[in-house]
Amino acid sequence: MTALVISEHNNDELKPVTLNTVTAAKQLDEDVHVLVAGKDCASVAEASSKIEGVTKVLLIDSEEYEHFLAENIATLVAKIAAEYNFILAPTTTSGKNFMPRVAALLDVSQISDICAVESPDTFQRPIYAGNCIATVKTTDEKKVITVRTTAFDATSAETGSADIVTMEEVHDSGISEFIKEEIAQSDRPELTAADVIISGGRGMQNGENFSLLEGIADKLGAAIGASRAAVDSGFVPNDYQVGQTGKIVAPNLYIAVGISGAIQHLAGMKDSKVIVAINKDEDAPIFQVADYGLVGDLFDVVPELEGKI
Amino acid sequence: MKILIPIKRVVDYNVKVRPMSDESGVDLNNVKMAINPFCEIAVEEAVRLKEAGAAEEIISVTIGTSASQEQLRTSLALGADRAILVESDTELEPLGIAKLLKAVVEKESPDLIIMGKQAIDGDNNQTGQKLAALLGYPQATFASDLSIADGKAVVTREVDGGLQTVSVNLPAIVTTDLRLNEPRYASLPNIMKAKSKPLDVMPASDFGLDIAPRISTLKVSLPPEREAGVIVESVDELIDKLKNEAKVIS
């Protein structure tokens, strides 16, 4: 039997989180296939075929899948799943949306957000906002799994040469409809794939001040993130949020600026390799997880850092 | 319109839980319990719809032990009209819970089901989607805005890249994200009133469904601890450390 990875993409480009998900899949099964479902997404299938170790790419190009509506995608995946032992997707808002629906259609207990594979039926996953790690074993024959992508390295996307097989499968539920999307356009790397992240918190005081972080982000090629407090206060949009209910990140360098370090924020970034905290409150909990802490006023420190970096 | 709000009793979000010393599970002795924060948002949204005249009846439901009556009473104090406890002494998985909720939906025929996107104990983020699948209903997960018109719910969803708006035919399942609303506090008169609102208890075993767990927890342990770091005195020292010690910038 084989593992199937549901690729994440925007109909044009393959999202890097797919590569980490393939790594998890390869720990479960030698044979890994990738499903590319979408509209006018041949370029995504092309990119997927180059992922090292992937043996087949299934391409399903049809307008019902353009916006990845859970009702349509889940029906499609559940049908294709008959041939597979493992069905995996990244723990993104997309994977979180349709995978439990797939699992229920297959009468399977999904294993959410795995951070390690111990054996083909035993996994580790964070619970209680990452305060504990549970080792869980499933008796389901088919395994439906979402993958914490920061816990697995990315597979190379250059050396593979999988066959692309085009399939026709139309599943339009007719009960849900896409209306619109407001997707942030940015030249910066995506938060979940960035090597360096600089994040602002409530200490930034307002949205305009986030521009202070841009200079450093430009110099380091960093993505810009935010704490829940900064998003709830309306400083920046929701897609900036790092934390238990936002994005889980693990860059090489995470710079937390004016972030106190609430549990739910730490849950989203404490697996970063190196953490820097800049905060004027020396008792802020963020300093307990930071490798390097600098106690000071961010409005002095950030411009100085930008100038000297 | 009739709204069903499935809720869950969980450890209070302020509590930092720890594994038991034998790593057999999470230590929940003498820990403060509360209604799951995302479920609270679901209750609030239902109450607002009723206050706006868009809904006539709100029913809260939970699957859990007898102690969960406490959280159902909270939901009644916040504005639910009646409550149902499907009583189970064993811990159930999202799949089993979704199966029981499906049976409750079939009995009550709500037009809209609003529930939390995830419980902050297991962090599974599955039950709403699974319930939708079992019922063949559409789903709108991670909602930050909800409006009802012409037999449809128009929902703005928080997605990784920003926001997505979908329209789903009713009956539908909506799961709440943080910014859908800010839940109110229950007033004392409403807490008193909630005590006399109807709360039905039915044993989970009466439903005759396959809700046996498929997943066993072998171990619960602490995540790897981060080593304590250092406080640097200046920006120059910070840059030096990042360049020469951590080697993360050049």
Image (tube, rainbow, N blue to C red):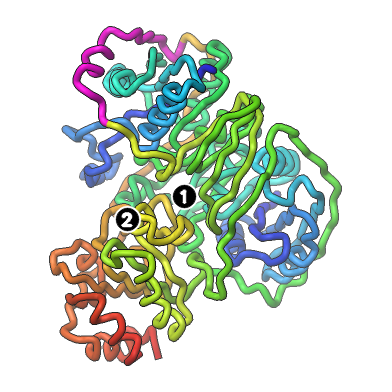
Read off the magenta span. Answer: B185-205
Task: Identify which residue, A238 or B97, lies in the foreground.
Answer: A238
Question: x, y percentage for residue B221?
Answer: 30, 50
Q: Along the horizontal axis of the image, is A227 left or right of B17?
A: right
Compared to B79, does B14 lie above or below?
below
Return the chain for callout 2: A
Question: For the view shown, which residue lies furthest in the left direction?
Answer: A283
Res B15 quadrant in image: top left
Return the chain for callout 1: A
Which residue sits at x=41%, y=50%?
A: A245
| Labels 1, 2: one chain | yes
Report if residue A127 lies within the magenta region: no
Q: CA distance from mark 1 to mark 2?
A: 32 Å
Which residue sits at x=39%, y=87%?
A: B249
Which residue sits at x=37%, y=68%?
A: A199
Which residue sits at x=41%, y=45%?
A: B179
What crowding class fits label 2: few (fewer than 14 Cα within 10 Å), some (14-19), or many (20 or more)?
some
Question: x, y percentage for residue A163?
Answer: 81, 64
Q: Amino acid at mark 1?
A: Phe
Task: Identify which residue, B145 or B159, lies in the foreground.
Answer: B145
Is residue A82 visible to the viewer in this orientation of the structure? no
Is residue B93 visible to the viewer in this orientation of the structure? yes
Query: Disc 1 marks which residue?
Result: A123
Compared to B132, does A269 lie above or below?
below
All told, the count of numbered labels is 2
Label annotation for residue A229: 2
Question: x, y percentage for residue B128?
Answer: 52, 33
Report if residue B203 lies within the magenta region: yes
